[in-house]
Amino acid sequence: MAGQPRAQTRSPFPAPSHKAQEAEEVCYEPREAATDTKFSDRLYEPYQLQTIAIAGAKPHPTKLVQSAAMASVRPPLPSYRPLLPKRLIDTGVLSDAQIETIIYAGEAHAEMLAGRYRVDESLDNLSLAKDDDAGAVQFRKGFFLGDGTGSGKGRQAAGIILDNWLKGRRKAVWISKSDKLIEDAQRDWSALGEEKLLIAPQSRYRQGTPIRLAEGILFTTYATLRSSGREGKSSRLKQMLDWLGPDFDGVILFDEAHAMANAAGEKSERGNKAPSQQGRAGLRLQHALPQARIIYISATGATGVHNLAYAQRLGLWGSSDFPFANRADFVAAVEAGGIATMEVLARDLKALGLYIARSLSYEGIEVEIVEHELTAEQIRIYDAYAQAFQIIHTNLEAALKAVNITGESGTLNGQAKSAAKSAFESNKQRFFNHLISAKKTPTLL
């Protein structure tokens, strides 16, 4: 009834598992540069913290390495002090290398990119604005984590969120490639002593309805993020933005960030290639929330210049750190220089404290190639399944026509047709991967 107070919505999540006073600022001291450092002719060098020494931190449980080019530069001396439970450091739940990431991410987030911009209503386009333009915004710097498999990227991501959580920023977004990866995110979050149910999937809330969470970590996928509005319901991006609010200054993790590759389109031998929908959705999210603390996570982030078009918050263009006025100039310059320029770019980003890339060491690892010879029966089985999928492929067009996705005049629903073909191809690849693995397993055992 009018005039009556609205009932308070209780959060379905439990309270944080530890008290705020149990968290302490992480202490570290400057580490002097080694004057007798000698580099070998190897491609990789053993990894160690080059600029800081973290009090009480344990080394990473497995040896880490970094490329010789990356080892040749030191990151800057930071001043940011993360807030973390001391037990995570004392017990080695977070290693010194992982804590270093949290420190440099916080250091980057403490600064703003140069220049002020106006964002149009579509959230697609930016235009440079004057300093006294009241409607212009300034974007917060981001950070890129490029560690390889086994370095604990998920736990580092959870640590960055926890640092901000303990500083009062009780909303965060975790974006990844698959909805199944929420289990990995919950595992990494709970490994830090937190309640895993604080991570909730966006798919729990129907499109067009508000997200009723007082606080928590919203887990979503790039496919969900790119979902447009339909049947009068707002898009998934709008649903997320309504929950976060325009002044949101918490963490947004772009896990497996290479899924946003080709965010700005590219030129190929076949002509111009349109920007990917996932890349555009990722850019729109960044444009809509200039105060958000952006983290890009990808082990293959610096392999191609077009894979970095989404990384707007690194200040690769339009800032005083790099000599490129806009994204187009940046892409053209790096394309002309090739892979060597990408390596120099990675070094420069590390020197600015915006990029870390380490991987597991294979020192002492022996590799033996085992060959499995297919039996006649295994070949027959494979051929039979291949023929079965060929039949499905042949009749796929008829199936699309039967459900009114295509018709006599052509495609009636392009998005549905693309989704159906994508689902068929991905399931086919997954099936044959399992089939081949099963055939090789007896020899492996």
Image (cartoon, grey):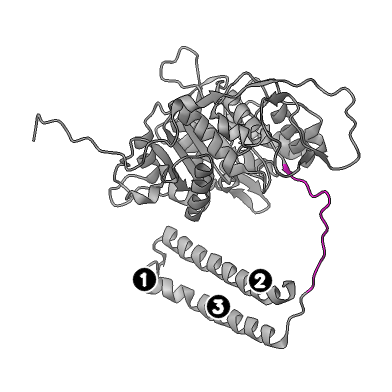
Q: Residues within 10 Å of mark 2 (few under 14, many from 20)?
A: few
Q: Residues within 10 Å of mark 3 (few under 14, many from 20)?
A: some
What is the secondary structure assignment of the residue under circle 3? helix
The amino acid on which the numbered mark 3 sits, given as a three-letter code, is Phe
370 falls in the magenta region? yes
Say left or right for 262 vs 30.
left
Q: In whole angstroms, how far apart are the C-alphas of marks 2 and 3?
A: 18 Å
User: What is the x, y in percent for residue 49?
Assistant: 73, 30
- What secondary structure characterizes most of the magenta part? loop
- Residue 24 badge: none
Pointer 3: what residue?
A: 389
Residue at figure coordinates x 70%, y 76% from the top left: 442
Pointer 1: what residue?
A: 403
The amino acid on which the numbered mark 2 sits, given as a three-letter code, is Ser
The amino acid on which the numbered mark 1 sits, given as a three-letter code, is Val
Q: Magenta residues, as a range?
A: 359-371
Query: Is residue 64 in view from this perspective?
Result: yes
Q: Farthest residue in the top direction? A: 132
What is the secondary structure assignment of the residue under circle 1? loop
